[in-house]
Image (cartoon, grey):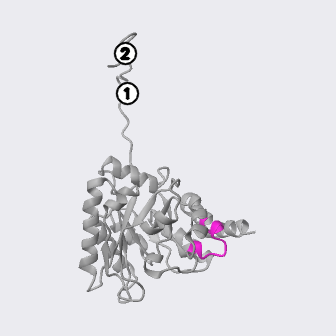
């Protein structure tokens, strides 16, 4: 029992002052549960609703590709500059320090490699995501792949079911196979299908007409950095995507394969959170590289 001596009667009721209703910065997320919003607020900066995600999950299909041969040496030092880390459970458990406080988006499916039939994936046990206290789960969807479209979409909505149960957001990752066109029409279809099937975030690629992709998708889109391109071009890519409706960038190779990864990730962050123009961001990259 609470000590009732000197009990003070309640008087500070704030009569006449309406309770503030705190808005939520991410589109399509206002009706989510508290836990879901809390995890999304770790990934997307609540001040601007934007996110720089550092991707290092390439090894789950590519093995030790250039720049992530040693994640402990290449990625861990960069985490302090990112809003979120995207990785696999194996890397998370074996390399990422448990003292880390950066939110994690967990690659939650696995299967085929670059040596076989890409996109033939299954979902890992989503309860593992709970054990690792991750902020989101990422599942690939192969829209337009005749063999894998239905299977990978089933992977997504199964993961969404678990995510809704435990309050963990799900990111649908649009895969682009050899037979798929990288154009706005395709990405409008792929991103919308991910959202319609319950994805809280969608990861896609930038293309001409990207503003129609973000406009027709009811949840936040983050763009993939894709293959390594010159630093100036990668900063231009990020700038154009953000100004055409993206909520963030999930960049890997264009950071960790850069001549100066630490300078590059800081320049990308300036584009995302400060709306720095590409030429200014590239100058920042060059200055930090000296």
Q: Which residue is mark 1?
A: 17
Q: Is residue 249 above or below residue 98?
A: below
Residue at 23%, 78% (x, y): give it: 150
Cα separation between marks 2 and 1? 31 Å
Q: In front here: 286 or 186? A: 286
Mark number for residue 221?
none
**Nearer to us: label 2 or label 1:** 2
Asked if residue 207 can be seen in this view, the reply is: yes
Discs 2, 1 touching: Cβ within 8 Å: no
Q: Residue 71, position in %: x, y?
A: 55, 70
Tell me: residue 61, above or below residue 23: below
Q: Majority secondary structure of the magenta segment?
A: helix
Region of the chain picked out in magenta, as a range: 254-265
Q: Position of residue 106 (x, y in %)?
A: 41, 64
Q: Position of residue 125 (x, y in %)?
A: 31, 65
Q: Determine if residue 197 is in view.
A: no
Q: Is residue 158 above or below residue 38?
A: below
Q: Secondary structure at mark 1?
A: loop
Quarter assignment of residue 195: bottom left
What residue sits right under mark 2 in the picture? 3
158 displayed left or right of 204: left
Residue furthest to the right: 290
Decide: few, some or many residues near mark 1? Use Cα within 10 Å; few <14, some 14-19, many ≥20: few
Q: Residue furthest front?
A: 94
Q: Give how far across and how far down residue 99 sits, in percent.
A: 53, 53
Say whether disc 2 or disc 1 marks the residue closer to the N-terminus: 2
Q: Residue furthest top?
A: 6
Is residue 160 found left or right of 286 in the rendered image? left
Q: Secondary structure at mark 2?
A: loop
Residue 44 inside the magenta-drawn segment: no
């Amino acid at each position: 029992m609470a000590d009732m001596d000197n009990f003070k009667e309640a008087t500070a009721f704030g009569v006449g002052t309406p309770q503030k209703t705190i808005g939520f910065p991410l589109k399509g997320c206002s009706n989510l549960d508290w836990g879901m919003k809390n995890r999304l607020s770790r990934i997307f900066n609540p001040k601007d609703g934007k996110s720089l995600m550092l991707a290092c999950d390439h090894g789950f299909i590519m093995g030790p590709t250039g720049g992530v041969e040693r994640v402990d040496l290449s990625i861990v030092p960069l985490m302090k500059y990112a809003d979120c880390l995207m990785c696999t459970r194996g890397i998370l458990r074996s390399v990422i320090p448990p003292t880390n406080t950066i939110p994690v988006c967990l690659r939650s499916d696995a299967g085929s490699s670059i040596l076989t039939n890409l996109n033939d994936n299954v979902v890992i046990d989503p309860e593992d995501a709970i054990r690792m206290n991750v902020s989101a789960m990422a599942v690939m969807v192969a829209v337009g792949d005749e063999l894998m479209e239905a299977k990978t979409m089933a992977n997504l909505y199964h993961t969404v079911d678990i995510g809704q149960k435990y309050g963990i957001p799900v990111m649908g990752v649009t895969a682009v196979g050899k037979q798929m066109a990288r154009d706005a029409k395709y990405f409008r279809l792929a991103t919308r299908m991910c959202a319609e099937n319950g994805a809280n975030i969608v990861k896609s690629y930038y293309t001409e007409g990207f503003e129609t992709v973000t406009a027709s998708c009811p949840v936040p889109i983050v763009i993939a950095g894709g293959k390594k391109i010159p630093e100036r071009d990668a900063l231009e890519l990020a700038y154009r995507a953000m100004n055409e409706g993206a909520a963030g960038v999930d960049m890997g190779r264009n950071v960790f394969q850069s001549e100066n990864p630490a300078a590059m990730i800081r320049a990308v962050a300036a584009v995302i959170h400060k709306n720095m123009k590409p030429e200014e961001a590239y100058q920042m990259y060059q200055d930090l590289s000296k």
